[in-house]
Image (cartoon, rainbow, N blue to C red):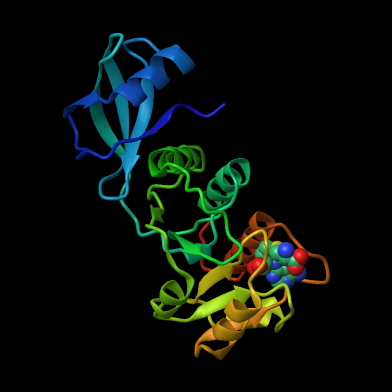
């Protein structure tokens, strides 16, 4: 098993002593059964990754000391995913896998056939951070506030590759032609006829097919992200 890796949204530098918040303290105590002296890695996108040592771990308060730097901060470019909110378990899965696959921004969009009741952003953030810690990323993908479908699509500077269950162009050549485009999947109920027509009229929307079977929205998102990543040949080995 890998050692403990903790995302800390505080300035990290050699020799500094940091207080842990309640969630991190609980995780270390109750889940990992760690004690003072436990060694771990702490990181964030600004300061990179550091070796650290727990100096105290009381019931509600933990402290650690940051030691030496293991990895400098490096940019982690990735695509924007536009998705319609899903039911709880499906959404958790989508966020976890999208984070593993390197998504940079997660933009929920309101669709006609989408799920209305919104999940708590704090809980979703927590899922995302756990996936960041597990997957050796430094950066936490941004979970943006829900936006209207049309407005969110218009706001993408490099266009949108749209997974359209009604059919479209071949995925791989489209991704290759628009590597900086955002990726869009519809809700479990699919795009409405009006949404599809409006999207297809919008300049810089590139509809693609994901094949002859109908995929769950989260599977479709994963396929887009996986194929997008497969086209990024500059990714260095760890
Ligand atoms: N209820 C719809 C399916 C929605 S699937 C129906 O029965 O037709 C949810 C979303 O996943 C879709 O809006 C689309 O973005 C994506 N998707 C699923 N299967 C797809 C496919 N074969 N090609 C392109 N997109 C697909």
Is 154 rendered above or below residue 84? Answer: below
Left or right, 41 with respect to 207, comes to left
The picture places residue 20, in percent across and down from the top left corner, at: 26, 24
Left or right, 19 with respect to 237, comes to left
How many numbered tags mark residues here? Answer: 0
Left or right, 60 with respect to 207, comes to left
Is 133 rendered above or below residue 108? Answer: above
Q: Quadrant of residue 198?
A: bottom right
Furthest-left residue in this view = 16
Q: Residue at x 55, y 90 (%)?
A: 201
Q: Residue at x 50, y 56 (%)?
A: 102
Location of the N terminus (image quadrant): top right
Which of 27/205 is in front?
205
Which of 131/154 is in front?
154
Figure quadrant, ligand 1: bottom right
Kindly tell me whether residue 21 is visible in this rendering: yes
Is 191 rendered above or below residue 89? Answer: below
Which of 7/66 is in front?
7
Q: Residue at x 61, y 63 (%)?
A: 113
Is 190 rendered above or below residue 8? Answer: below
The picture places residue 182, in percent across and down from the top left corner, at: 49, 72
The picture places residue 6, in percent across and down from the top left corner, at: 38, 32
Kindly tell me whether residue 177 is visible in this rendering: no
Q: Residue at x 16, y 29 (%)?
A: 16
Q: Quadrant of residue 232?
A: bottom right
Which of 29/74 is in front?
29
Q: Quadrant of residue 161?
A: bottom right
């Amino acid at each position: 098993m890998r050692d403990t890796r903790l995302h800390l949204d505080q300035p990290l530098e050699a020799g500094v002593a940091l207080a842990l918040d309640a969630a991190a303290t609980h995780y270390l105590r109750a889940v990992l059964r760690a004690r003072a002296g436990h060694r771990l890695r702490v990181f964030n996108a600004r300061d990179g990754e550091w070796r650290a040592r727990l100096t105290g771990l009381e019931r509600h308060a933990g402290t650690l000391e940051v030691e030496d730097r293991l990895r400098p901060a490096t940019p982690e470019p990735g695509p924007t995913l536009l998705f319609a909110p899903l039911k709880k378990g499906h959404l958790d899965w989508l966020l976890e896998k999208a984070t593993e696959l390197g998504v940079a921004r997660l933009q929920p969009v309101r669709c006609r056939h989408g799920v209305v009741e919104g999940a708590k952003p704090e809980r979703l953030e927590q899922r995302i951070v756990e996936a960041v810690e597990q997957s050796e990323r430094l950066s936490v993908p941004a979970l943006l506030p829900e936006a209207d479908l049309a407005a969110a699509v218009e706001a993408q500077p490099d266009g949108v590759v749209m997974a359209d269950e009604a059919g479209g162009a071949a995925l791989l050549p489209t991704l290759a032609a628009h590597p900086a485009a955002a990726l869009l999947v519809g809700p479990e109920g699919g795009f409405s006829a009006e949404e599809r027509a409006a999207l297809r009229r919008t300049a810089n929307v590139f509809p693609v097919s994901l094949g002859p079977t109908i995929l769950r929205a989260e599977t479709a998102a994963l396929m887009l992200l996986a194929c997008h990543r497969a086209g990024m040949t500059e990714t260095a080995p760890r």
